Image (tube, rainbow, N blue to C red):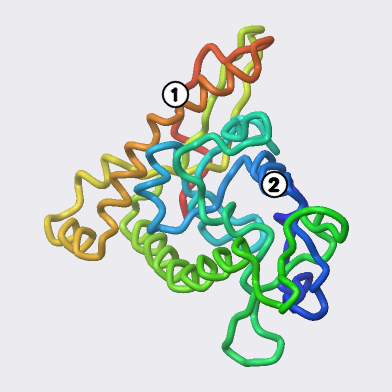
Amino acid sequence: KHPEYEITMSTLVELSNTVHKDLKLRESCLAEFAASQQLMRLRVPEVGKAATNFPLFFSRNQQDGSWVLSALGSFEPMQNVFVEQGRWNAIYQPVSLQTYPFYLMQSPKLENSYTIGILETSEAFSKDSGEAIFDSAGRASMHLSKAKNLLEASIKQDIDTYRFMKETESLGLIKPIDLQLVFEDGNTQNIAGLCTIDEDKLQSLTAEKMSALNDSGYLIAIHAMLLSIYQLNLLLRKHNEHNTHNKITQLKIEVAKDRVAS
């Protein structure tokens, strides 16, 4: 697990243009962070764009058991094949990567209000080199301004995503799967914990339920998730380009019989 995954609200500190006036963003920090993200968290408005690059899945948040919508960036933990030679190399970059190393946190001063938080110990920051977060007048840098706008928009998008998950779960559309990889040397690897859309269940929904999914805008996201499974071929190709010494020769998707989606 990447240490940034272990962030809890208690470890975040409110970003301040006085306390943190000397902080700079290390030039390579965004690429380094992205390169370690096997699963990239998504929100439902991103699904259409993300499906053009990545296979998309549901999984459980290990901290609280809630559903998470993610793009798979690698078959290997702590890796992302879409970062090549220190550069992001995909058409779409998930918002969760674009906003790094800034996070939304509950305001310590105002109840029911949000503010921008940082992990002060994060390796993304430096006092010596990189892009200043604030200028001499205390104004936000372009990167911080963009991250702030994206994070503010994400409050509503998180609610939409939660509703999308709830709806797909209540309709029984979440199907647990395992990815089974066979390597050139004969070894096999199993990636468990992923869930996709159950296409058979989707086809068997009543016209009323399909219409309701369409009206809520969720049907487009559901179809995009189904189509995104074909991006496993792209992931496989990229994996084999990176790991020429032991290529994956076969990839099978198995229904996880020992797991239920609830």
Question: Would residue 54 appear left or right of 38 to someone viewing this image?
Answer: left
Q: Residue at x 43, y 73 (%)?
A: 156
Q: Residue at x 15, y 55 (%)?
A: 206
Front in this rendered view, residue 221 or 96? 96
Measured from the top left, where is residue 254 in percent x and y? 46, 29
Residues packed near mark 1 inside 10 Å, few (<14), some (14 to 19) or many (20 plus):
few
Question: Would residue 146 appear left or right of 116 to someone viewing this image?
Answer: left
Residue type at mark 1: give it. Answer: Asn
The residue indicated by pointer 1 is 233
Q: Earlier in the sequence, mark 1 or mark 2?
A: 2
Q: Secondary structure at mark 1?
A: helix
Q: Secondary structure at mark 2?
A: helix
Check whether the beta carbons of the residues at disc 1 and disc 2 lie within 8 A of each other: no
Measured from the top left, where is residue 81 in percent x and y? 60, 31
Q: CA distance from mark 1 to mark 2?
A: 24 Å
**Furthest-right residue in this view:** 128
Q: Residue at x 66, y 76 (%)?
A: 139
Query: Residue 19 lies in what quarter of the image?
Result: bottom right
Q: Is residue 110 above or below residue 191?
A: below
Q: Is residue 44 above or below residue 249?
A: below
Residues packed near mark 2 inside 10 Å, few (<14), some (14 to 19) or many (20 plus):
many
Residue type at mark 2: give it. Answer: Phe
The residue indicated by pointer 2 is 33
Q: Is residue 135 above or below residue 171?
A: below
**Furthest-bottom residue in this view:** 110
Front in this rendered view, residue 186 or 120? 120
Query: Residue 229 lies in what quarter of the image?
Result: top left
Q: Is residue 45 above or below residue 29?
A: below
Measured from the top left, where is residue 56 in percent x and y? 45, 42
